[in-house]
Image (cartoon, rainbow, N blue to C red):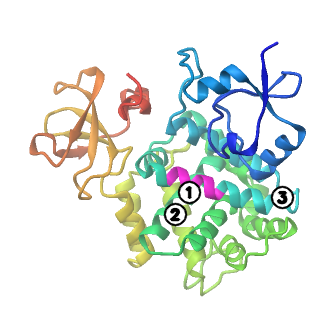
Amino acid sequence: MPQMLKLIPGQIMLGMPLPFGVRDENGKLLLARGQLIATESQLEALLSRGLYADATEVEASQGGRSDKADTKRLTMFDLWDQAIWRLERVLKSIDQEPVFAQRCDEFASQMMGLVERDPDIAIYLSVRKDERRLAHYGLTHSLHCALVCQLMGTRSGWPVDRIRTLVKAALTMNLAIVELQGRYAVHGRLSEEQMTEIRRHPAQAVERLKAAGVDDAEWLQAVLEHHERPGGGGYPSDLKEVSEAGNVLRLADVFMAKISPRASRPAIPIQDAARQMYSESSGSPAAAAIIKEYGVYPPGNFVRLASGELAIVIRRGVSALTPVAAAITDKTGAPTINTKQRDTAQPAYAIKGIEANSALALRVPPERLYGLVE
């Protein structure tokens, strides 16, 4: 039996991939290397029972030796993929008062950390949706709306605590209809009963949040009002005046819904969705902030360059019109094995137009575009 070391809190970082396998006192593997511990409560529960690790694995993680057979290093794309399922677990803990509010706060902070580490990858994932995951639309939509809210709040100079509150509202606004959203994205049809459920979901979400111990007035109000429209015409209460947070949440919700594909329709081009958002909000500062954060050609856009190459935007540039793109074809349009980064501020690689999504664009792994894999 390998030598076992008992772990202390400082050896395990919340929200970060485990550097070694975690075991019980008998050596039974509880969590494999690379997995995440998502919440403080989960970490405390594990530590209270006693956690151990193979001494050689701990030594290797600290640089004592190198093992090329180790679990592959997790990329930002892996972490965002894990965030989808962590959010699902958080939302399903809604009936575990008072754990739910704490879990929401922890998850929101961790998600905001991912955005801060690489906002371009976060934007890429919100623009270039994986159409094979339509059934999980309810979860990914909430994550992407939370991203939009964070970007808007940061650009607008909101205090961090207020941004986090808005992020939590985005993550929980649809908790009553997450599964229904997935079914609609896949099948494109709603019954009368389901339509009624849709119109009731803001109030239902607030009821469940309150029952779970959430008492943050701005969080609750934003959730309740995220389908209300200034001047009237929204639901569930047809309010004439809407809170700032509620209005921002509605903008993010509608913007993300428009650029998301469904089985019944393709995604609306993001440039069209941005123009519609700006016009429908009468040029509101929040809409302007969102548009400035995404840029004219945001990460995830499929474009044609002056060189004749087809490319996918991967980084925002110095200006909204000059992002960095990764070419996935040569100048004749033939696919290339290796992608090459192109600075579209250079005339030879200027963007000449937006291309519709194609099978070619969808086949290229995002990790290759960002130079994370060969």
Who's the residue at 74% across and 55% down the image? 177
Mark 1 or mark 2, earlier in chain: 1
Mark 3 or mark 1, earlier in chain: 3
Residue tagged by mark 2? 150
Mark 1 vs mark 2, CA separation in Å: 7 Å
Please state, as top left, top right, bottom left or bottom right, where the C terminus lies in the image.
Answer: top left
Q: Which residues are magenta?
A: 108-115
16 magenta-colored: no
Q: Quadrant of residue 17?
A: top right
Who's the residue at 16% across and 33% down the image? 308
114 magenta-colored: yes
Tell me if mark 3 has few (under 14), some (14-19) or many (20+) residues whose alpha carbon lies within 10 angstroms of its own: some
Residue tagged by mark 1? 112
* Count of residue discs: 3
Q: Secondary structure at mark 2?
A: helix
Residue tagged by mark 3? 99
Q: Residue 258: where, in percent of width, then height? A: 49, 55
Please say if 255 is above or below 369.
Answer: below
Please state, as top left, top right, bottom left or bottom right, where the N terminus lies in the image.
Answer: top right
Mark 3 vs mark 1, CA separation in Å: 20 Å
Q: Secondary structure at mark 3?
A: helix
